[in-house]
Amino acid sequence: MKKVVVIGSGFGGLSIASRLKAKGFEVTLIEKQADLGGRARTFSHNGYKYDAGPTVITAPYLIEELFSIHNEDFKNYVKLLPVKPWYRFLFNSGEYIDYGGKLITTAHEIKSKYGIKKARAYLKLLKHSKRIFDKGFTELSDAPFESISSMIKHLPELMKIRFDRSVYKTVDKYLNNKNLNEALSMHPLLVGGNPYSTTSIYLLIQYLEWKWGVHYSEGGTGKIVDGLESLFIKKNIEIKKNTEAKKIITKNGKVIGIDTSKGIINCDLVVCNSDPTYTYKNLLGFKPKKISNKFNLKHSMSLFVLYFSTKKIYDDVKHHTIVFSRRHYELLNDIFNKKIFVSDPSLYLHRPGATDPSMIQNGHDNFYVLAPVPNNLSNIDWENRGNELANIIINNLQEKIMPGLSNNIVDSFFITPDYFENDLNTYAGSGFGIQPVFTQSAYFRYGNKAKETDGLYFVGASTHPGAGVPGVISTAKVTEKLILRDYGIN
């Protein structure tokens, strides 16, 4: 029986641990923190629990598979609740669109506010999204890309779906309306990309949401992590918390173990859910062989997230509200390219109590609000500027959507890019690994199998197919295929 160590317990690490155990590997999962989940962990603060990260659950079958491969029923561990609407898009003008739930309702919403031509244009955009989905997700999301030639054979179809266009440019081609352009090109921001530079392949997310809906895990996203931890204990997957990887040990061009904060663990192979840029620099001590990964990778923006609870129940606030800034292109340029402090951020507000009454805690409403910010290549001093941005965000919400907010907050704290860099060990505090531009897609992303030494593999946001919960879980499916091939297991 081959022994594998998985570094990191984000959704990528949890997924590959489940999959390899089901194939007969002896699996040890190590995690730096005292709890599992990585970006999807749960924060506890003054008697309140908060989702630390992803709350939009799409393509739930990918999570269900992690249980069914062990002949376990997902529903015995986790209950998913449908979110309706999926998002409220609130524009600077005060106009809004409720998006998702039923297609006819969304089309009517667009028609009532922007006219029947825009509603028909949206349906044409969605049809285009399905074509991208059929290629980019159904066919390629779990396909290994180990060479440039493995990409070239797909170029004719990729050219037909105009992968060379950005998400924003493609949306504008169909909708040609400022508000609709901003709303319907927002999905790249959920996976670390700038809509103005992210390849239009990522428009597949629009159709993906319609195919399976948008869900929330009852009790919080952390309940999915808890469910997997219970499964692992039942299936004898060894879990080592408070155990940080310090060095991946190799001998004669092969992985033989890991040096950790709790001592050396011998193994036959290692799967890293750790950030690849951090891993190569700190755990391996050399640069990747693959030329596309050696130099000048573009890393994603980071996130400033304010967690808070209020004594007032804001019943009219939807589960996910996206509040757009007056600026759009200029704001994103400041974040991704200029990397400067922004005082007018767009916001992503999460109110789980809108879907799950159990998240009304201690009789109080529970929230997080997320603002995209530059990663730590900006050199912003978050120790000094964190409170400033928190106050800007509270004032913004109070003015636009949550009257009396500042007087109703009973608990709050925030995380900055420093959390991503120091606690999650991501390069420059990036929130999603490397950006999803075409020159960093498929083969050009970090390899699911490392080329430098035998027995070293990767899963997670910076590998193929990319970030987001479905993407990250799919990286484990790609990596599993490579491991089973390499070790001759059916």
Image (spheres, grey):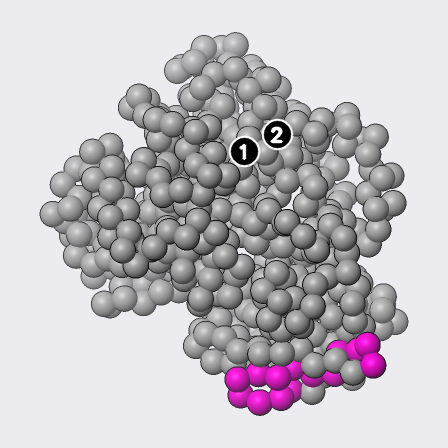
Nearer-the-camera pick, 259 or 162: 259
| Quadrant of the drawing holding the C terminus | bottom right
Estimate the x, y position of residue 416 in percent, counting from the top left: 37, 56
Q: What is the secondary structure assignment of the residue under circle 1?
A: loop
Residue plotted at (28% across, 51% down): 385
Residue plotted at (70% across, 29% down): 164
Is 198 one of the magenta-colored residues?
no
Q: Is residue 471 visible?
A: no
Estimate the x, y position of residue 458 in percent, counting from the top left: 68, 64
Which amino acid is tagged 1? Pro
C-beta proximity under 8 Å, tags 1 and 2: yes
Estimate the x, y position of residue 55 in percent, counting from the top left: 44, 51
Q: Is residue 425 visible?
A: yes
Bin the neighbour count of mark 1 within 10 Å (Cα to Cα): few under 14, some 14-19, many 20 and up. many
Q: What is the secondary structure assignment of the residue under circle 2?
A: loop
- Alpha carbons under labels 1 and 2: distance apart: 7 Å
**Residue with the mark numbered 1:** 195
Estimate the x, y position of residue 365 in percent, counting from the top left: 24, 51
Which amino acid is tagged 2? Ser
Nearer-the-camera pick, 459 or 441: 441
With respect to residue 429, does 108 lie above or below?
above
The magenta region covers 252-265
**In the visual, does 402 lie left or right of 89?**
left
**In the visual, does 385 lie left or right of 126?**
left
Residue plotted at (24% across, 48% down): 388
Q: Earlier in the sequence, mark 1 or mark 2?
A: 2
**Residue with the mark numbered 2:** 166
